[in-house]
Image (cartoon, rainbow, N blue to C red):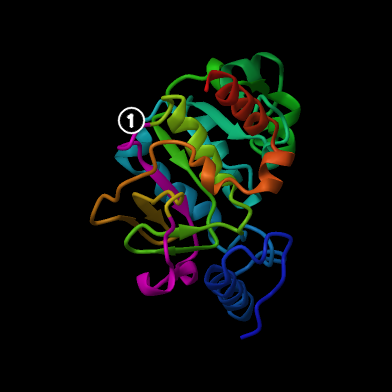
Amino acid sequence: MDTLTTPWSGHDAVKDRLRAMVWSRLKSHGAALGEPVGHIPRFVGHERAAAQLAALAIWQQAQVVKCNPDHVQAPVRLRALQDGKMLYMAVPRLTDERCFVALSASALQQRGVALESASTSRGAMQHGTLVALRDMAPIDLVVVGCVAVARHGGRTGKGAGFADLELGLLRQHGLIQAHTPIVTTVHALQIVPETELPMRAHDWWLTWIVTPDEASAVPTAQTQPTGLLWEQVRPEQLATIPVLRALRGTATRND
C-alpha cells in the first residue's frame, strides 16, 4: 500500500504506513464518517463508544477529565459535562500558551450556553476559559484520540505528536500521574496487532480501549514517560507551540 501523505508524515515511516492502512480500512468498510485521512477518524458508532466509556467505574469515579479536541470525541466531552465533571480540552494544536480550555456545566448553564454547543471543539473555544498549566486541577482521567491502537496499550494519533506533548506537559506539572487512566474511543477496525505498532520513548500508553461494542482494559501496565522529553521535541513543535517555548526559556534560565 502506498503511504498517504499528510502534513505530519515523514517522522516515522512505520507509523505512516500503519495510519494509511487504518484510514483505508475504515473507508473501504464504510466505517468512517467523513474523510478520515489526516485526521483522528470519526467512526460509525462513536456515540455508542462514548456511552460504553461512561459505564466504566473509572469514568464514574472521575471528577476531572481531560479530553482531546477532535470531532469524534465530542460525545465524550458532552457526556463529561452532562455528568457534572470538570472538563479540560486541549487547545487545538496548542496554539496558546494557556494550552487548555476549562469547561463546567454549571458555569455554562448559568450563561445560557447549551452543553451540546460547548462540547464541540469550536464551542469549547468560544464558551470555555483558557487556562495555563499552573491554574489547572489534578486530572482523574485522560481521553486521547487515536488512529490506531493495539491490545497491549500501544497507540498512535495522526502523527502530529500533540497528545504525547500534552501528556508530557501534564505529567511534568503534576497534573497526571503514572497511574492516571488513559483511554480512547475507537472503531474495532482501528485495533491492530501489537507487532505492527511500535512505541517510542516519548509515547504514552493506553490503559483502556473502548469501541462501540466493548471496553477492554489493557492487561499489563506499561511504564509511562515521566514528563516532557526535550530531546524528542521536534524543531517545528518548538517553533509553533508557545507553551514549549516558554518552558524551554524557563529551563534555560534555570540551568
Viewer-nearest residue: 182 or 189 = 182
Q: Residue furthest left?
A: 220
SS at badge 1: helix
Instruction: Name the image quarter holding residue 46.
Output: bottom right
Which x, y percent locates residue 182? 40, 44
Which x, y percent locates residue 234? 63, 49
Residue 162's place in the image compared with 39, above or below, is above
Kindly identify which residue carries mark 1.
Answer: 61
Which x, y percent locates residue 219? 24, 56
Residue at the image point whose x is 69% and y is 37% from the top? 241
Residue at the image point whose x is 29% and y is 55% from the top? 218
How busy is the neighbourhood of tag 1: few (under 14 within 10 Å), some, or many (20 plus)?
A: few
Instruction: Judge whether residue 120 is colored magenta.
Output: no
Q: Which residues are magenta?
A: 177-200
Kind of residue sitting beneath label 1: Gln
* Relative horizontal placement of residue 38, taking residue 44 as reference (left or right): right
Viewer-nearest residue: 73 or 95 = 95
Which x, y percent locates residue 155? 45, 58
Residue 237's place in the image compared with 136, above or below, is below
